[in-house]
Every structure is written in structure tokens, then in C-alpha cells.
Amino acid sequence: MKRIQTSILFLVALAIAFPQCAMAQKDQFNPIETGVVSLGIAPDARAAGMGDLGAATDPDAYSQFWNPSKYAFAYSNAAVSISYTPWLRKIVNDIFLANVSGYWKLGGGDNQALSASLRYFSLGEVSSYSDLEGGAGQTFNPYEMAFDIGYSRKLSESYSMGIVFRYVYSALGYNSDGGSEAGNPVSGASAFSADISGYLTKYPIIGQSECQWSLGWNISNIGSKLNFDNGTSPAFLPTNLRLGTNFAFPLADYHTLSIGLDLNKLLVPAKPRRVDYEDGIEGDEEFQRATIDWENTSSISGIFKSFSDAPGGFKEELREITWSLGAEYNYNQQFFLRAGYYYENEYKGGRKYYGLGAGFALNVLRLDASYMIAASQNSPLDQTLRFSLTFDMEGLKEIFGRR
């Protein structure tokens, strides 16, 4: 049976993680490999406009992705947001990410909230081949999706925690000789995961101005492994540790500027590479044993191993940390300007790009847009455009209640 495996079908999508692999030295280029890479794509234009920043920013409808514990501090009692992101448009024109997120404050109070989100990542239309000579085959539409539901609660006046439960499904392959009809889709791989997060916010007085300082953390996608090909091709979920801080201060009446920093590290063990072992039969055997051990490592054990398993030692572990630095200007919660920068070490993927964005809020509706500018030449992420639309459900209820 011939199949297009996840690793093959996802070569185009992997450009989101490895655009600079040709520029890095091959013996040092060692990115962390995971399944469902699309879970790491920022869904909203607001965060993207600040260089993919969101662990400690003010809560909004997309906090489910960045830090769900922020919902307990949300200003509105309920909101729903939708977004659409054309992806890798410099390569193909039919890959996209669609996302719906929302939350609801329980009991109309300020202490707890329920939240949910649904994301769908389409790899567009892929053609299969019916024979080795490249004869005409069929087409299919590989995709990945995730649905989650969360709960957040204030534990004090300044600190909250949240938890999210997620179902993940990946359908990225096909059978070229599956039964009587070629091109039959392969059954997808699924997994369950959970997030746990915390959010602290304080209001210090500096001079004569009240400022806001926030700290956030989120460990996402802690769960089972994906098993493709009936378990013969296991893949780790992109378990991730996100730490962030944000500081907002008034410039003048109705004018506020906030500056934030996020740090991220994948909590996934590094896959063994043949280049890290001695030449010869003995080296081959050691490499094979290490590969089998990696495949049999549980996701929980992998989290702890991820802090000390890099072939290059502590120096390489530091390379696995990505960071985002961004700022947002806010005029009276009605007009927003944003800018930011995202950095990933060249040996771990090499994504480096600037984010620019703007937002407009009118009554119950808010529209955000962002634009990505790659910091390196020939990056497939260059010129990525995102749009987000948020509805304040509490405001809508008030409008319709007057009629």
C-alpha cells in the first residue's frame, strides 16, 4: 500500500516552521518535530500585529489560544470572535486557517468564565497519483482541526487560573490502492490534550498615573500522542510553555501604550539524528535504539526530557526558546495601532518577522487586521495578512433589548 504520509503532505505547511533551513548549517539545524504544527499558528490579528504576543496582554475573545485564565478578568460578560488567515500565499493559494472563539462570564459576575474555540486548518486540494508513472489520480483535501472548551476563575483580586480540554484531529493522508477505488482517504489520527494557565495583574501608581502590569503563563497541549499508520508513525503534540509580561501606562487622557514580551519553549523531546552518532555499524545500532526510545517516550516523560536532551547541551536548549516583543497604542478603546517582532534561532527553524496591525472598535463590533513582514529573504511567511472580527454579545443584547 502506498500512502502520502503526514511528513510528506506537510512539507509545504512545514515552511511555517522551517523557512530558513537552507541557510543554517546542516549539522546544527535541529528543529523540534511535532505533529499538528498548525496548532502553533496564531489565530488572531491583534496578537499577530504585535509579533505573536498574548500571554499577558489584556483579555479578549482569543485568550483561549494565548492564556485562557485571562477570561476571568474580561471587561465584557460575553464575546465571540471569528478570524480568517490565508497561509503561505507565496507558495500556494488555497491553504488557510479559520477560527471561532468566545467566552461567557458565568452568572454575569466577575469571578469565572466558560470559553470555547474551534479551529480548522486546510491544506487545500492535493492530487494523488494512480501509478508510479505519475498517471492521473484523484484529489483530496487534507486538513487539521481542534475543538476545545475551558474554564477560568479568579483566585484573588489580582490572580486567576484556567484549564482547557481539547480534541485534536489530523487527516493528512490517502491510500493509493485502498480497495476498489484509488485515492481513498486514510483514517485520521486524533488526540486529547489539556492546557493549564495563570494570569496576574496589578495596578501600580507611577508618578501620578495608574499603570497596569501583568504576568501570564500557559502550558498548552499536554496530552496523548498522535498515531498515524495504525500506530507505526507516532507524533508528539506541540506541547508548549509560554511565559509573558505586559506593562501598560497612560500617555495622556484617552491615550495608552502597552509593551509586552513573550517567551516560548516546546516541551517535546528532540528526535535523534544520525549525524550525532559515530560512523559505522555501532553508531547505526545506537541511533536505531535512540529512535525507538524516542518513539516509545510518553508525552508526559517527553515534557521533562525536553529540558535536557538537546545534543548541543544547555546552549542548544537556549536556542529552543523563541521570543516576541511588541507594543500596542490604544486611543479610548476605539482605535489601535500595533507593532512587534518575532525571533526564532536559525538552527531551530529560523522564523524572524515583523508584525504590523491596526484595530477599530465601534459599539459592539471590533475589526482587527495585521500584516507580517519577514526579516529574511524568500520567506514563505512574508506578506501574510490576517483579519479578526469580534462581537460584544453583552452590547448586542442591550441594543436588541431596547427595541
Image (cartoon, helix red, strand yellow):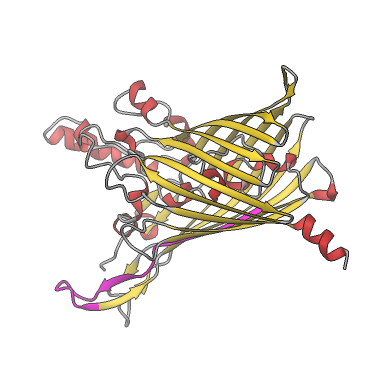
Image position of 313 (left or right of 215): left
Image position of 1 (left or right of 398): left
Q: In the image, what residue occupies the spot 87% across and 64% down?
A: 401
Q: Give the range drawn in magenta.
A: 116-136
Hey, which residue is sitting farthest bottom in the picture? 180
Asked if residue 125 lies in the magenta stretch, the reply is yes
Number of marks in picture = 0
Hey, which residue is sitting farthest top in the picture? 207
Q: In the image, what residue occupies the spot 44% across and 61% down?
A: 96
Residue 4 in percent (x, y) is at 29, 63
Viewer-proximal residue, 119 or 20?
Answer: 20
Viewer-proximal residue, 115 or 249?
Answer: 249
Residue 86 in percent (x, y) is at 44, 59
Image position of 144 (left or right of 381): right
312 versus 128 height, above or below: above
Where is the N terminus found, in terms of image quarters?
A: bottom left
Image position of 70 (left or right of 98): right
Residue 183 visible in image: no
209 versus 71 height, above or below: above
Residue 125 visible in image: yes
Hey, which residue is sitting farthest left in the picture? 280
Hey, which residue is sitting farthest front in the picture? 252
Residue 144 in percent (x, y) is at 46, 60
Viewer-proximal residue, 286 or 364?
Answer: 364
Residue 113 in percent (x, y) is at 75, 47
Viewer-proximal residue, 276 or 328?
Answer: 328
